Amino acid sequence: MKYYFFFYLIFMTSFVNAQTELSAMKIVEKAQDAIKVKGVQGVSILTIIDEKGRERVRKIAQVTKHYSTDKTEKRLIRFMEPADIKGTGLLTYDYENKEDDIWLFMPALRKTRRIVSSEKAKNFMGSEFTYADMIPPSVNDFTFSMLNDENVNDIDCYQIEWLPVDEDIADENGFSRRITFVGKEDYMIRKSLYFDIDNELYKELYVFSIKELDPVNHRYRAVKMEMINHQNGRRSLLENTQLEFNPNIKDDYFTLRYLERE
Amino acid sequence: MAEKIVKYRWIIIALFIIVTGIFTSQIPSVEIDTDLKSQLPKEMPSRLSTDKIDSLFGGTEMIMVILQSEDVLNSETLVRLRRLSKRIKRIRGVEKVNSLFDLKSIRGEEGALIIEPAVPKIPKNDMTREQLRKNIQENDIVYGSVVAKDFSLAAVIAMLTPQTRDEEVLNAIRQVIEEIPGNEKTWIGGLPVTRVEMGEYIRHDMRLLLPIGISVMLVFLFACFRQLRGVILPFMVVIVSILVSIGFIAMIGWKIHMVTVILPILLIAVANDYGIHMIAKYQEDNIPSNNFNPGQLAQRIFQSLSMPVLITGLTTMAGMLCLLGHILIPAKELGILAAFGILFALAASLFLLPAVISFLPRSKPVLDFSDNEQDRIPFFERLLGFFSHLVSDHPKGVLLSAAVLAVISIVGIFGVVVDTNPNGYYEHDNPTVRVSQLIDEHLGGSQTISVVYKGDIKSPELARKIDRMEEKILELDEIGTTISITRVLKQMSKALDNQQFSDKSGLPDSREGMAQYLELYSLSGDPDDLNKMVDFSYEHAILTARVNKTSTAVIRRVVDRIKDMVANDQDVFLVGGFGVVLADLADAVVNGQILSLILATIVVGVLVSLLFRSLTAGFIAAIPLTLSIIITFGLMGVFGIELNIATAMLSSIMIGVGVDYTIHFLWRYRVERNLGNDLKQAVRITLTTTGRGIIFNALSVIVGFSALFFSSFLPVQFFGFLVVISIFACLTGALVVVPAICIVTKPAFLNPAEIK
């Protein structure tokens, strides 16, 4: 029964909303563009809080650079806290058309290992955020439709519904319906609702503050956001501090040699 | 009193209708509870520790879907397995799925660390298939746990979220299996499945046993009394007491358990005993030569029978209430329910029956004293005659034979095995049993014993300790597989090729190393994988061992061994898991058995002593009971019938019911002695008069309980069998051994002089 409902939704939206879908997809694409920054560095504090209120805090330094020539994003993450994982580094080359390259440096082993993982881990560092929240998924995997505009924290937002085109995509992204609230002015997502296969709300994303990094191209980053998972009772907070736009980050950062520097 | 019953008969009948109506209205809300854990007292250590494990590491319940084929690595089976795993993962109530496609392969290859599903993609040709086989064989996490070592079975294990409704998840999984058909033989198992099936069997039993018991009893009653009211009146008492006692379950918020299946049958067998006596008296008085009106007949019944009916009713209730000494909650509840039902039956027999009889027009007399009763059952006549000769001619020989029989039976008692495993509930070809055999043989075992450590889990010392314990536990023959965080860390070490900064076992040699391994896992694997092995704050870690035998005795031994091993370890927080619960259950069954046995014998002895105002009477009453207990347990040992949740309740019930025959005998015997008959004369008269009533009474119990032979549960079947045997032993004890004792020992309380 629930599957019928699911297909019914796809069916309806693809025909009835054919016109609005275009504009909905446009908005999503613009939202994806809004966070494409040439180069950014900063320190993030990730707090994972379990259902009993216990906390796990991770402090990481991050530099990201976008290489438009080969459409590759390179990223270096260095753990700062807690002490026992301090110095652990993760270097990622995110290619557009092939599997990512990932290297991990573990100070306790004093060596670097290339990591081959056939599937992207769904959860970002064991938190409730998924990589899909960080790196926008392909628009071709979804059908979009516009719902009524809504205000989120006094900001006028488009309300857009995402439906995965098939069950595999739904599995990969971990939701079978998503509603995002996109600010009309900056095209930044302010709020996101995730629904499971039974069309029940199971995760909520809230973006509390946003910083414009590149005023020329109008590129932004969320500064503070929270993901609440109703299924396991956990929530995660991500706070990006010292965010800085820097299109001229040294290429040297994104090398194994640098990764192994403690 | 007797006149009042006739005077207020309207009120009595109305009262019974109202009370029965109130209780009956509760029956639709009665629920079935098949959880084994809830049968244990809340304060029991193993129940507490298992609850604690649930709260630390999430649900431990799992449903296993198993595919069986010649080689599960053939693409057809793998495709089906993957589809099953995917679909099952989406079912609500399934927290997580473990299968070849979900569990990880962590290995090093050409200097790279590879973390991917154990089966990353389905092999297209023999070469890739054999490479995959090799990888799986080297993967400790999956080999022998979600895939059989001979590759004949592959499993999809659905871990359930706590407080999930078994039925809903199971039905959803069954539907998925139906929608994804294939050539492989498909099995579905696990405790939740066992529970759902048990619930189905309980409902089936309730629907089937009741009609069987009722029809058998109707036929029996008609054979005895050959008169419609002789069938309907005792039967009315039975039905009323069953309705009231089942309604009582809901009224006080209890639930139906496996052993509760016995309740209606027990009431069919026992609750009509009083009515039988009253109808017999009715027929005895309702003969052409007497000219009693219905009211007078009712009064005579009450006057002559109220006392013996009350006493035998009380001893039966006392026996049932001795189940309170049992540690298992359902057994306690059954004791109270049965006592309540019998109390109601007693009240109905004493007041309702005479009240109704006073309304009924006199029936055509059944007995006309033309000796037709003797024609009907010459066998019992001859048998009782034989008994009376045997007893009066060779009293000492009778006692000696009884003693010899008892000694032989004692030998058999040593062969009694305690087994509380739910698999023992069913025949060997039952699918539930087959599945757990498959799991035990090929997939690591179905019962778990867990050791929870508390401390700084990231410290290498504690990790090493856990690892050494895991190695030691793995050496036990009865352990199929183990899983722990250190197992995963060691596998990572191997894959990272970390020899420099690790100890001999492969674990990292520093706290930083431990922390970085754990971080690496949560970066690349599914962090939920670790939730089942270490808690969120890295303060508790769980080492889970799976036992590949189902026998409770074996599990008990393993639990004791493991408890011994960790006895002096300060870091061990608790030892728990379902295996420990089962082992404790076995102890509880034995202790409950012994306690309720002693309690029942003492209480019944005291009641009989009070009745005859003589301690000797109590002792004499206890002799056939003891004999019957010894013989029953001896037979259990000889036939290999296990002592389990159902059979453990045997003794109290048997003692409460079985003592009635001795009471009837002694009561009549004293009357006959008082009339001036000598020892042997009194025995002969008692046996040929009251003896017949005793046989009828015992037969009705045997016939009633024989309905349990049709139960879906082996223990309940065995219970039925054992009740039949033990009631038969009680009957023989009352008709042969007790008379012989009376002749040989000449107890003072039975002497005519003493009575005055």
Image (spheres, helix red, strand yellow):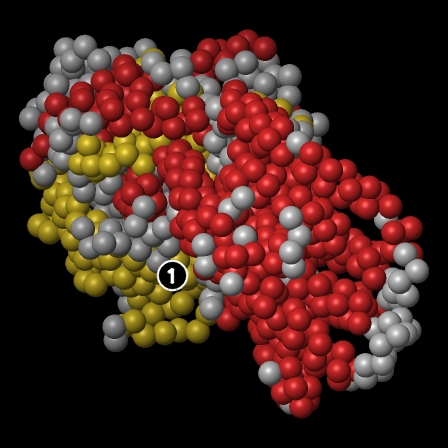
Helix, strand or loop at disc 1?
strand
Q: Position of residue B294 (x, y in %)?
A: 79, 82
How many callouts does the rendering have? Answer: 1
Give the quarter of the image for residue B650: top right
Q: Position of residue B86 (x, y in %)?
A: 52, 39
The N terminus of chain B lies in which quarter of the figure? bottom right
Residue located at (27% from left, 61% from top): A206
Tell me, yes or no, if residue B112 can be seen here: no
Report which residue position mark 1 lands on: A193
In the displayed structure, B28 sits above or below A7; it is: below
Which chain does the residue under circle 1 lie in? A
Give the quarter of the image for residue B12: bottom right
**Camera-nearest residue between B473 and B386:** B386
- Which class describes the residues within 10 Å of circle 1: few (<14), some (14-19), or many (20+)? some
* Circle 1: residue type: Leu
Tell me, yes or no, if residue B620 can be seen here: yes
In the displayed structure, B472 sits above or below A176; it is: above
Please give left or right for residue A159 compared with residue B435 in the image. Answer: left
Residue located at (93% from left, 60% from top): B370
Residue located at (45% from left, 30% from top): B552
**Camera-nearest residue between B289 and B453:** B289
In the displayed structure, B350 sits above or below B521; it is: below
Q: Position of residue B226 (x, y in %)?
A: 87, 62
**Camera-nearest residue between A22 and A141:** A141
